[in-house]
Image (cartoon, rainbow, N blue to C red):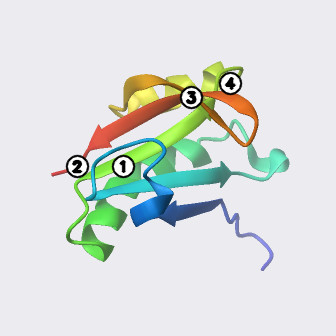
Amino acid sequence: MAGNVWPFFTLHRGKGVAPFSDNQDAVFFRSFSVDQRYRNKGIGKVVMEKLASFITSTFQDINEIVLTVNTDNPHAMALYRQQGYQYMGDSMFVGRPVHIMALTIK
């Protein structure tokens, strides 16, 4: 589709959240990416601004968004902090060190 930009992410519930949160009503936001050609144009910020309302309208029982960010990605960390995500700790994910971050949405 010419002229459209399609960011990508996945959402996991249940066991997919378990390594990073004990909250059974959380969703794990992962694999967020924007095509390199369209980075630094505010697309990630728009997605993050709309994510909480999308999740609450789609999954009425979810009250928290949990994500991980590679420790060597300060730009993503800054974006998530701007949206209100709080640092929850460190872990390993797919063999890489990550920071765990979470946002309460209800």
Q: Counting residues from the N terminus, which is met first, the one under dot 2 or under dot 1?
A: 1
Q: Counting residues from the N terminus, which is met first, the one under dot 1 or under dot 3?
A: 1
Q: Counting residues from the N terminus, which is met first, the one under dot 4 or under dot 1?
A: 1
Q: Amino acid at mark 4?
A: Asn
Marks 2 and 1, how far apart at CA: 7 Å
| Helix, strand or loop under label 2 | loop
Q: Amino acid at mark 2?
A: Ile
Residue occupying the point 32% across, 31% down: 84
| Location of residue 101 by image quarter | top left
Residue 4 left/right relative to 69: right
Q: Counting residues from the N terminus, which is met first, the one under dot 2 or under dot 4?
A: 4
Callout in the foreground (3, 2): 3
Q: Which residue is mark 1?
A: 65
| Location of residue 57 by image quarter | bottom left
Residue 76 left/right relative to 4: left
Q: Amino acid at mark 1?
A: Ile
Marks 4 and 3, how far apart at CA: 15 Å
Q: Which residue is mark 2?
A: 105
Q: Position of residue 61 (x, y in %)?
A: 20, 68
Do the residues bearing badges 1 and 3 touch, measured as CB atoms within 8 Å?
no
Marks 2 and 4, how far apart at CA: 24 Å
Residue 26 left/right relative to 96: left
Q: Which residue is mark 3?
A: 91
Do the residues bearing badges 2 and 1 touch, measured as CB atoms within 8 Å?
yes
Toward the right, the furthest residue is 37
Callout in the foreground (4, 3): 3
